[in-house]
Image (cartoon, rainbow, N blue to C red):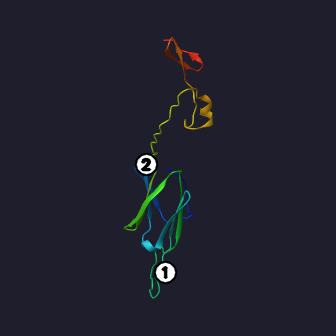
Amino acid sequence: MLDRVAKNADGYPPYNIEQTAENRLRITLAVAGFAMEDLQITQEDNQLVIRGRQRDDSEGRIFLHRGIAARQFQRAFVLAEGIEVEGAWLDNGLLHVDLQRPQPEVRVRTIQINGNGARGGASQGSAANASTARSVETRTVNGAPLPVVEGRASRG
């Protein structure tokens, strides 16, 4: 469902893409140390962009070793046509983004059948249908009425 993934040169943060159902995917990013307010997810047309920016809270702290990255990132995913973002949540340092491809709607349309050789369109009051309308006349033969349709007399 994802056409392509635009990758950062260093591959940070690492991520997984898994299929959770027939028409559902989940992108999971490892964002340890990021709070919800440090993360932003946007969808611009068919591109899903996830950004992270941590606040610098190292004031007054002296690190003897700093191995936990506190850097910003941007990861972009190009979504296939029709993919929708269902939602996202942060759980134990993992950001999950659920995607789905909605099932196409089954559309049922009733087509009107026109009579008397009329083609297409509505049958009420149009000039095209007025030209196909025929008048029905009645004539009498030996005192009995005979309908005349399309200029021909019908005989019983």
Could you tell me which secondary element the residue under label 2 belongs to? loop
* Residue for point 45% across, 86% down: 62
- Looking at the rendered structure, the kind of residue marked 1 is Asp
Instruction: For label 1, count other residues whose C-alpha is less than 10 Å away and answer few (under 14), some (14-19) or many (20+).
Output: few
Specify the farthest residue to the left: 92
Could you tell me which secondary element the residue under label 1 belongs to? loop
Whether label 2 touches label 1, CB < 8 Å: no
Residue 33 at least partly seen: no
Q: Is residue 148 above or below residue 78?
A: above
The residue where tag 2 is placed is 23
Q: In this view, does 59 lie above or below 41?
A: below
Q: Is residue 126 left or right of residue 50?
A: right
Residue 110, horizontal then vertical, whole percent:
47, 37
- Looking at the rendered structure, the kind of residue marked 2 is Asn
The residue where tag 1 is placed is 56
Depth check, mark 2 against mark 1: the one in front is 2
